[in-house]
Amino acid sequence: MRVLVTGGAGYIGTHTLLELVAAGHEPFVVDNFENASPRALARVGELIQRPIPHATCDVRDRSTLTEIFEDIRPEAVIHFAGLKAVGESEERPRDYYDVNVAGTLTLLAAMEAVDCARIVFSSSATVYGAPDYLPYDEAHPTRPLSVYAKTKLMAEDILRDWHSAHPQSAVLLLRYFNPVGAHISGRIGEDPQGWPNNLMPFITQVAVGRRDKLMVFGDDYDTPDGTGVRDYIHVVDLARAHVAALTHAEKTPGAEVINIGTGQGYSVLEMIRAFEAATGLEIPHEIAPRREGDIAAMQADVRRAETLLGWRARHGLAEMMASAWGWQSANPQGYTTDN
Ligand code: NAD
Ligand code: WQD
């Protein structure tokens, strides 16, 4: 299918482009490069041996977006574009509502203009909030704890209501757990700007010498070793889930919310040990106070993804670690210096 990919230059987007092309789809990227480098798209082009067609455009720019849709006539959309830093969302709520919520509305208007009725949306496990039980299944109540989480849930609601008004449409709301790792080539990967918010890029930046040590946020949680437990998923598996979602959307109208994780939880200390085992490096770390807003543990019930999409994660922790290091060690400063 012709697939318009918003935010396709970002971390998950670039990995998904490779899987889309491998599955025979024709992606077209729309990105404003606010949190991505054009070099990332160039690297994807190098891996598939042809350039990735793209336009520099903000998803809130309705007239340009509609022109692009009229030109490309996509049969489906994957909507990655968004702002994603939980802490920043509390400081800049207007920007988060604008990009993540208003941007989704603008995108729907552009889709309607060309009768495009299939959309795969990047939602997040963060919409669940504090767990009543684990693993979270998709029926678990949603109680977002941050502005970021609220924007994701609002966008989900908008897309569900849009489907109700357009019953022939296919809306797939993928709730990602914690994506980590990189493509096996080491040519693309996660390249956060400034201080990394997430655990995995922090570990690889310590390993490559950009940071002195990792602060472990809390060791007094009600978890086996006291540190936070998460469901980390290899970004290539996550990318494949988007291809499976498109296959489903091609044939089946409906609005579905689907967890995308492995179903396995690992603690911060287990993550450090797994990285050390996979790389032979040592990660200096220190126990620090809990980070505000963190929960002790979360992991996904992944049965729906398997039943509905025929998808399940294939890569384990060792591959997540080795590939994350493959990317970071070959690109110590991310995309800032090209080679
Ligand atoms: P990313 O920041 O690497 O990618 C997002 C892309 O969107 C970037 O290329 C950025 O330049 C682009 N973008 C931002 N605002 C835009 C705008 N107004 N118009 C056009 N393009 C814009 O992030 P990612 O990790 O690849 O995440 C992709 C999506 O998945 C996001 O919606 C994020 O909220 C969601 N998500 C990410 C995670 C995670 O941990 N990485 C977890 C759950 C959900
Ligand atoms: C993982 C664990 C931390 C950094 C966030 C968003 C979520 C989603 C994924 C977008 C926790 C601990 C972390 C560090 C640490 N993003 N940690 N030292 O918080 O589960 O989820 O990213 O949708 O919405 O909330 O991921 O990688 O930040 O943290 O000890 O320097 O690592 O306390 O237990 P999180 P994370």
Image (cartoon, grey):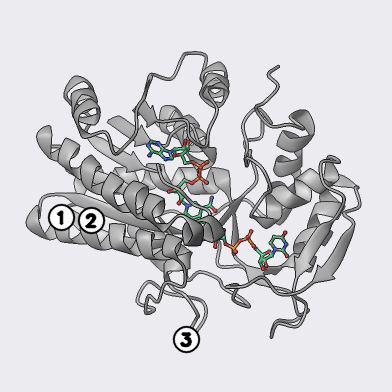
The quarter of the displayed image where residue 257 is located:
bottom left
Q: Are marks 2 and 1 in contact (CB under 8 Å)?
A: yes
Q: Residue at x 17, y 52 (%)?
A: 253
Amino acid residing under circle 1: Trp
The residue beneath circle 1 is 162
Q: Residue at x 15, y 49 (%)?
A: 169
Q: Is mark 3 within 8 Å of ligand 2?
A: no
- Secondary structure, mark 1, is helix
The quarter of the displayed image where residue 316 is located:
bottom right
Q: Residue 218 location, x and y as percent?
A: 75, 75
Left or right of residue 139, residue 317 in this image: right
Question: Which of the numbered marks, if any, corresponds to residue 159?
Answer: 2
Vertical order, 173 against 117 (above or below): below
Left or right of residue 121, residue 265 in this image: right
- Secondary structure, mark 3, is loop
- Secondary structure, mark 2, is helix
Q: Residue at x 68, y 19 (%)?
A: 338
Q: Residue 26 location, x and y as percent?
A: 34, 25
Amino acid residing under circle 3: Asp
Please tell me how crowded label 2 is: few (under 14), some (14-19), or many (20+) other residues with Cα within 10 Å: many
Looking at the image, can residue 36 be seen? yes
Q: Quadrant of ligand 2?
A: bottom right
Q: CA distance from mark 2 to mark 1?
A: 5 Å
The numbered mark, 2 or 3, whose residue comes first in the sequence reads: 3
Question: Which of the numbered marks, if any, corresponds to residue 132?
Answer: 3
**Residue toward you, 226 or 64:** 64
